Image (cartoon, grey):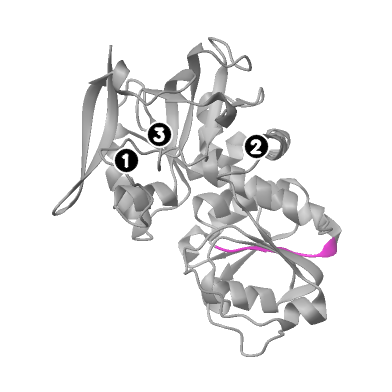
Amino acid sequence: MAIRALMIDRQDEGIERRIIEFPEDVLPEGNVRISIDYSSINYKDALILAGKGNLVRTYPHVPGIDLAGTVIESSDPTFTEGDRVVLTGWRVGEIWWGGFAEQACVKGEWLVHCPDALTLRESMIFGTAGLTAALASLALRECGVDPDAGAVLVTGATGGLGSIAVHLLARMGYDVAAATGKPEQAQLLKDLGASEVVDRREIGDPPAKPLLVERWAGVVDAVGGSTLSHAAAEVRYGGCVALCGNAGGNQFPGNVLPFLLRGITFSGMDSVMASRSRRLQAWDLIGQHADMSTLAPIVHEVGLDGVADCADAMLKGSSAGRTLVRVQGGT
């Protein structure tokens, strides 16, 4: 059968993006074949679709770093025909063909079973963004930042990762402050569980001093750059910053004094190569705490034909929440 997919290719004038059909035997070799129902659009997908970041080395290429679907055939003993599975990371969608196609062949070691508490569609509401948010929430808890330790700050709160982090932390009992440059989204953030909405201009510049007034027991930062250095200067003694993204830049114009004088911890979140056991912990946390009805307003859904436009909007900063990709039967 022919497999429908979004394929990109590098041309002299830039990246060509088109919907094509190709035979099954064109897929890369893997020991598990999956019929894909849903994928999602993450910031890394947007970079790939624009040809940025040197993330794709070989063209033509099928992007999509997330996928959820049903096993068609498997030679991996962990998975059998009919299993519901989820894949995020492992450089799928970068150096291995990804989820913007009706089928994928992958390595079984990259897969986890879809949590019983979630449908395949719901698993992609989380995807890489949600998994990273869950890993960050685990990191805060493991660093000793308990709900009674004080408020936690989430930067980039209207993005996919940030909005899910706000929701999960609030459901875990934390007092959550959500930082955003989109004041029109304030009520939505409060509906997700934020008790306070912070204008990102308050924390967007480098701190005037190495140590500012202690405000945050913990931080989930999806922005980086000067926002990260400002937030770090406001973390309370013994607090933790979970580093999740670089939408505001890769540089950290910071100071060592918050580490030396307040004993704060920086914890990096790598959702790409995280171990299976760590992923299962994160998916378990999602299954325990997520309220799908509350998350519904942040979810948008497109078919393969709508992926490119949504990715372009994400790079321009005009998107919010999570965008699902309906792979089977959708345009």
256 lies left or right of 19: right
Callout 3–callout 2 Cβ contact below 8 Å: no
Number of marks in the image?
3
Q: Which residues are magenta?
A: 149-155
- Labels 3 and 1 touching (C-beta < 8 A): no
- Determine whether, in the image, residue 176 is placed left or right of residue 157: right
> Is disc 3 placed on a helix, strand or loop?
loop
Residue 100 highlighted magenta (yes or no): no
Residue at point 71%, 77% (across, down): 234
Q: Nearer the viewer, residue 219 or 202?
A: 219
Rate crowding at label 3 as few (under 14), some (14 to 19) or many (20 or more) other CA atoms within 10 Å: many
Please identify the quarter of the rendering in which residue 149 is found. bottom right
Q: Amino acid at mark 3?
A: Gly
Tell me the CA gap for discs 3 and 2. Answer: 28 Å
| Residue 150 falls inside the magenta stretch | yes
- Residue placed at 49% from the left, 19% from the top? 32
The mark found on residue 307 in the picture is 1
Which image quadrant is residue 79 in?
top right
Residue on which the image places disc 3: 98
Circle 1: residue type: Val
Left or right? Give the position of 227 relative to 40.
right
Residue 21, given in percent of the width and then of the height, sits at 23, 23
Task: Describe the element under mark 1 as helix, strand or loop.
Answer: helix
Tell me: residue 234, above or below residue 122: below
Q: Quadrant of the C terminus?
A: top left
Q: In the image, what residue type sits under mark 2?
A: Asp
Question: In which quarter of the view is residue 239 placed?
Answer: bottom right
Q: Residue 291 has which mark?
A: 2
Q: Nearer the viewer, mark 3 or mark 2?
A: 3
Residue 101 locus on image (x, y percent): 34, 28
